[in-house]
Each structure stands twice: as structure tokens, then as C-alpha cells.
């Protein structure tokens, strides 16, 4: 084999190895990012409870980013609704909770939070409906 041919095969082999390393790194990083973003929300109640008032904007930004990537993540919509409620952004909170409700109508925490918000807004009829839905789901479980 000539020197040029050997160099050519060496170059092709090196390029193939680099390609394999790049693809495996990409797959690993994609998997790692996916598992990290999901693990952030495995204990959603803890996440919400641990957010201090001065960090609400940051937590909201994290949830919005998660929803940008996965708009059907109902638990993130619920968490965002609860955080909006903590910030006293009641209309935004209701909007997020209603979105989550369309995805998971049997998620009991949604009705609990909606009840509280409707009470704060003085919307007694809506509050009563949310409470009735909550109690019905609680009985069914």
C-alpha cells in the first residue's frame, strides 16, 4: 500500500471515530438533560413549597422554559399556576390551572387551588363548583 493510501485510510478511520464520539456525546447529553429536567419536577409539591417569595420570578422562568420544551406537561402548568397565585397574579394562575385541567381533569390539586383563587376573587359560584369537583374526586380515590 502506498503512503497516500495509508494516510487516506487513517484519515477516514479518524473521521469515523470522531463521528462516533460526537454522536455518542450528543445522545448522552440529550439523555442527561432530559433526565435532569424531569427530575426537577418529580416532587412538584416540594419544588413549589421551597420557592421563597424573592425567587418566584426565577421559578416561574424555569417552569416557562420547561413548558416551552414540553407544553403538555400538565404538572408544570399546575406548578406555574400555584406560583402565579403566590405572586397574586390570579388571572394568570387560573389560566394555567385551566390548561392543566384540560390535560388532567382528575388532578385533585387543580381544584383545590382554583377554589382558593376563586374565593380570593369573590367568585363564590365558581369556588363552589371547584370545591364540589375536589370533594367528588376525593371520594372516588
Image (cartoon, rainbow, N blue to C red):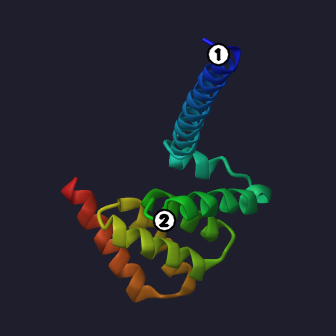
Residue 59 is situated, as x and y percent measured from the top left of the image, at 68, 56
Residue 34 is situated, as x and y percent measured from the top left of the image, at 53, 43
Q: Quarter-wise, where is residue 60 in the image? A: bottom right
Horizontal side, residue 74 vs residue 84: left or right: left
* Front residue of this view, candidates 1 and 32: 1
* Secondary-structure class at tag 1: helix
Residue 101 is situated, as x and y percent measured from the top left of the image, at 37, 70
Label at residue 71: 2
Q: Quadrant of the N terminus?
A: top right
Q: Residue at x 64, y 19 (%)?
A: 10
Q: Earlier in the sequence, mark 1 or mark 2?
A: 1
Q: Residue at x 55, y 62 (%)?
A: 67
Above or below — where is 14 with respect to 96? Answer: above
Q: Residue at x 72, y 60 (%)?
A: 56
Q: Label 1 to label 2, Cα distance in Å?
A: 52 Å
* Front residue of this view, candidates 28 and 103: 28
Q: Residue at x 69, y 51 (%)?
A: 51
Label at residue 6: 1
Q: Residues within 10 Å of mark 2 (few under 14, many from 20)?
A: few
Q: Quarter-wise, where is residue 23 in the image? A: top right
Amino acid at each position: 500500500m502506498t503512503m497516500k493510501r495509508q494516510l487516506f485510510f487513517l484519515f477516514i478511520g479518524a473521521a469515523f471515530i470522531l463521528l462516533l464520539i460526537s454522536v455518542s456525546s450528543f445522545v448522552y447529553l440529550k439523555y442527561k438533560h432530559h433526565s435532569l429536567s424531569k427530575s426537577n419536577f418529580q416532587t412538584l409539591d416540594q419544588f413549589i413549597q421551597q420557592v421563597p417569595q424573592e425567587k418566584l420570578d426565577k421559578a416561574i422562568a424555569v417552569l416557562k422554559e420547561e413548558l416551552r420544551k414540553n407544553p403538555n406537561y400538565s404538572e408544570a402548568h399546575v406548578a406555574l399556576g400555584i406560583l402565579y397565585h403566590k405572586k397574586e397574579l390570579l388571572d394568570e394562575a387560573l389560566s394555567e390551572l385551566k390548561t392543566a385541567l384540560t390535560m388532567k381533569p382528575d388532578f385533585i390539586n387543580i381544584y383545590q387551588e382554583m377554589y382558593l383563587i376563586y374565593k380570593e376573587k369573590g367568585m363564590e359560584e365558581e369556588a363552589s363548583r371547584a370545591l364540589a369537583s375536589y370533594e367528588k374526586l376525593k371520594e372516588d380515590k
